[in-house]
Amino acid sequence: MSDTDAGPTVEPDALRTPIVAVLGHVDHGKTTLLDTVRGSAVSEGEAGAITQHIGATAVPLGTVSDMAGDLVDPTDFDLPGLLFIDTPGHHSFTTLRSRGGALADIAVVVVDVNDGFQPQTIEALEILERTGTPFVVAANKADTTPGWNPRDGSPIQASYESQSEAARSRLDENLYEIIGDLSDEGFSADLYWRVQNFAKNVGVVPMSAITSEGVPDLLAVLMGLSQRYMKEQMAVDTTGPGAGTVLEVKDERGFGATVDTVLYDGSVRAGDEIVVGGTDGPIVTEVRALLQPRPNAEIRVEKRFDKVEEVRAAAGIKVAAPDLDDAMAGAPIRVVRDRDCESVIEEVESELAEIQVSTEEEGVVVKADTLGSLEAMANALREAEVPILRAEVGDIAPRDIAVASTANKEKHRVVLGFNVDVLSNAEPELDESEVRLFDDDVIYQLVDEYEAYVDELERAQQ
Ligand code: GDP
């Protein structure tokens, strides 16, 4: 493999690969589904069946069609395949389409057929509704239906027809419950083979990530949905100045702070001037290196990556550049290239402003793992009429405790942490202060917990 091999780059003026996000409640099978798609792609196709990106896996059309069998005829499609974001349920998704940009084009909401709707299922649906992102529901773990007779890798209808009457009606019952719950959330949904228009109705795909039953169907629906309803969005200039979203900010030995990025438009080249959203506003810097995972790398830190000269949308890439320490997960990243840097800074600024949280003189301190989740937290608190004194991306630091402890009202001497840790140097401070910490990884549960606490305080004061 040459040093400049950037994986499956798209030819200029080609359609880019649709980006797929997998969301859903914990333990409903998101990771297993992604592993199964990757694993069966590798065993189904030859070399090049998939390409590992930073934070994402590209499955080319040929491989999708190998896996989906008769359900996907490659000659019906001109999209290059599917790019699956690897971190399931990632909270950067909450910014997924806040503005023209897109972290993901389509989503799979995984629901355990037996467990049904759970808090993170509802949260995922709220995000998808707010961002107008089309999605399908993977009704997972169909194989756990009592009396189920597995047919590994089979399309779901053939498998369904081979089941006992009792197993079929048990599965049906659970599927109709999911369809009913979707309708309660305001989505018109049906079993996917009855859906005519996937842009208007949500298709429910019964499947199993363990036996792969229904996985062909899921891939066929994702491919069909993209081809039919996303094609215009995929027609980007993949050689123009790149645009993407920061998934994660990570220190890498020898490179300092780097940003793992999903690039949904244009290209990024080594040496490009870039503008990245940071905690103190836009960061202007220059790409020092673009890093892709080295295939079958040994875990010897300095050998884990291959440097590439250019990467084109859609792709996941690690960008190494000076001054990225304050970059924020969920923030935009833009390549300047032949444009005026000031105008790109303004673009990033206005995008940040759109997801900036307005604060008040008195209120609680909020910390969240990404800009998108911070925004979602702020929305939920606004709805609950909870004022915010300070809202930031990042782990809970000593100064957060210090700020919270200055509040006049007891109910505001609070830090709400969404998907973040307490830094070890903040722990003694937290213990010694009167500050109450609430943390959770479901936004509305966090808000509920806080409201219950306020109720308790008010009752105690009466
Ligand atoms: P996540 O938290 O949504 O990523 O869920 P995981 O993928 O980690 O799955 C949680 C558990 O459910 C694991 O023990 C999986 O092996 C199991 N699981 C996931 N999908 C299926 C499925 O289709 N059938 C069965 N029987 N188990 C599954």
Image (tube, rainbow, N blue to C red):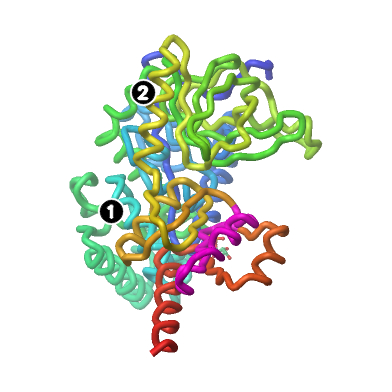
Q: Position of residue 93 (x, y in %)?
A: 43, 47
Q: Is 396 within the magenta?
A: yes
SS label for mark 1:
strand
Residue at image x 31%, y 33%? 100
Q: Position of residue 418 (x, y in %)?
A: 51, 59
Residue at image x 51%, y 68%? 413
Residue with the most extreme right position: 300
Say how many tags the image has: 2
State which tag comes first along the sequence, 1 or 2.
Answer: 2
Q: What span is colored magenta in the figure?
A: 395-420
Residue at image x 27%, y 63%? 182
Q: Position of residue 432 (x, y in %)?
A: 68, 71
Q: Which quadrant of the structure image shows residue 169?
A: bottom left
Mark in front: 1 vs 2: 2
Name the residue tied to disc 1.
Answer: 203
Q: Position of residue 422 (x, y in %)?
A: 64, 60
| Label 1 beta carbon within 8 A of ligand 1 | no
Name the residue tied to disc 2.
Answer: 15
Quadrant of ligand 1: it is bottom right
The amino acid sitting under disc 1 is Gly
Q: Is residue 210 visible?
A: no
Q: Nearer the viewer, residue 292 or 437?
A: 437
Residue at image x 32%, y 49%? 135
Q: Is 323 within the magenta?
A: no
In the shown orientation, is residue 221 left or right of residue 435?
left
The amino acid sitting under disc 2 is Leu
Q: Quadrant of the N terminus?
A: top right
SS label for mark 2:
loop
